[in-house]
């Protein structure tokens, strides 16, 4: 039986360094290959890391307790402000934390480097070869990397997924556009450790108190047009705010929050898509054929399952499960084909920034 001596990880976002750290804990060295030429600083919105995610990070030695803001309770309500129910954290478990994705990425990336894990940028995967000796990843710059196993952590538009399974489905638009904002002097004040989810008449809105007294909020509303990030940003923030004010005109506290959000504090996210499962809802690494079939184990595609239907709720806008990182893997397969993915464009923030704000609202 051939043992796993080393791993090649494709994708240097959140999942790649986390996977490398977990493998290192198991005694398996790895190298992370990222197609972009730099780290993901300033990329992404806000996400929520639940207690199980915090514990998982702790296992690989990453502590984000100093980042973001703790959220201990969640309250569900309707658009009139009537509370349906609320629930707190579980005894003995830490509070969830809302953090900027870029901060989570930086914490994982830096810790991986501290542990001696190599992260190479500017490596765009184009094909994969498999022999009895192992798996070889071939990159657009002509270089290659060999390992006992290749792991895809490269997003919902994963190149690894397509190479392993050419028929793998693409991400599917769920019929919702996502927005977020920062409201000032709205008159809305709630406990800082509580996140609210309000099912409005026309759209969902979630919110929580930021530490500086403002309110962070996020909203999804139905749209037949699946505007991507760049397409959505081509429309002015003022015009989007007009539409959001109409959508939430009858909602409490949605109306007040949107009305007290300026164009400079609007986050434009665009369409929401869900990860689709492939071949029975599984995701796995690409092992060398020298490893017996019983060791080609598949793991549940938790990201796809957690996004199995369009939800105007926790998973809709900013708050995303840690188990659905930006970059994701693929199901196991056989013959590899060359990738037709176009060269990466320079990184740019995936949300509108706060031009007049030099610090986070927490």
Image (tube, rainbow, N blue to C red):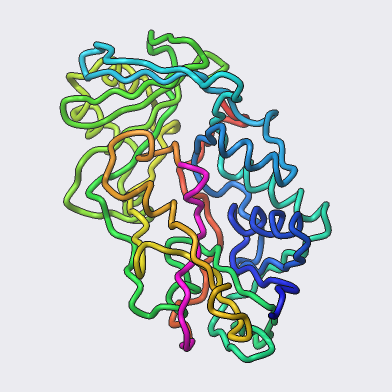
Note whether 249 is above or below 106 in the view shown: above
Front in this rendered view, residue 40 or 235: 40
Residue at image location 45% in from the left, 41% down from the top: 320
Q: Is residue 357 magenta?
A: no
Residue 344 in picture, x, y percent from top left = 52, 70
Front in this rendered view, residue 362 or 282: 282
Q: Is residue 241 left or right of residue 140?
A: left
Q: Quadrant of the N terminus?
A: bottom right
Q: Is residue 94 left or right of residue 60?
A: left
Residue 292 in picture, x, y percent from top left = 59, 80
Residue 65 in picture, x, y percent from top left = 68, 29
Residue at image location 64% in from the left, 75% down from the top: 149
Residue 248 occupies quadrant: top left
Residue 7 occupies quadrant: bottom right
- Residues shaded magenta: 321-337
Q: Quadrant of the C terminus?
A: top right
Residue 340 in picture, x, y percent from top left = 43, 82
Q: Residue furthest bottom?
A: 131
Residue at image location 71% in from the left, 52% down from the top: 109
Most common SS among magenta residues:
loop
Note whether 302 is above or below 201 in the view shown: below
Front in this rendered view, residue 84 or 356: 84
- Picture mark count: 0
């Amino acid at each position: 039986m051939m043992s796993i001596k080393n791993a090649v990880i494709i994708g240097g976002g959140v999942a790649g360094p986390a996977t490398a750290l977990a493998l290192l804990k198991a005694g398996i060295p790895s190298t992370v290959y990222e197609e972009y030429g730099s780290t993901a600083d300033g990329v992404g919105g806000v996400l929520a890391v639940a207690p199980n995610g915090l514990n998982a990070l702790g296992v690989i030695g990453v502590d984000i307790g100093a980042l973001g803001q703790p959220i201990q309770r969640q309250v569900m309500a309707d658009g009139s402000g009537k509370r349906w129910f609320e629930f707190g954290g579980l005894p003995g478990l830490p509070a969830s934390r809302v953090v900027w994705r870029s901060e989570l990425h930086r914490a994982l990336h830096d810790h991986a480097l501290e542990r001696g894990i190599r992260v190479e940028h500017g490596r765009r995967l184009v094909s994969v070869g498999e022999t009895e000796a192992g798996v070889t990843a071939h990159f657009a710059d002509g270089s290659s990397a060999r390992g006992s196993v290749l792991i895809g952590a490269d997003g919902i538009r994963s190149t690894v997924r397509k190479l392993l399974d050419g028929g793998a489905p693409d991400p599917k638009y769920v019929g919702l556009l996502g927005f977020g904002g920062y409201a000032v002097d709205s008159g809305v004040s709630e406990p800082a450790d509580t996140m609210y989810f309000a099912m409005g008449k026309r759209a969902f809105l979630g919110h929580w108190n930021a530490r500086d007294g403002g309110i962070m909020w996020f909203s999804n509303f139905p749209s037949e047009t699946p505007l991507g990030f760049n397409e959505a940003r081509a429309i002015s923030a003022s015009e989007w705010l007009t539409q959001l004010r109409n959508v939430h005109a009858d909602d409490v506290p949605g109306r007040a929050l949107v009305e007290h959000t300026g164009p400079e504090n609007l986050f434009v996210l665009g369409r929401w898509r869900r990860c689709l499962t492939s071949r029975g809802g599984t995701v796995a690494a690409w092992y060398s054929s020298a490893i017996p079939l019983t060791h080609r184990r598949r793991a549940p595609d938790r990201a796809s399952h957690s996004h199995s239907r369009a939800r105007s709720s926790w998973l809709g806008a900013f708050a995303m499960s840690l188990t659905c990182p930006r970059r994701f893997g693929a199901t196991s397969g056989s013959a590899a084909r060359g990738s037709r993915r176009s060269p990466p464009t320079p990184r740019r923030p995936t949300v509108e920034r706060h031009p007049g704000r030099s610090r986070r609202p927490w």
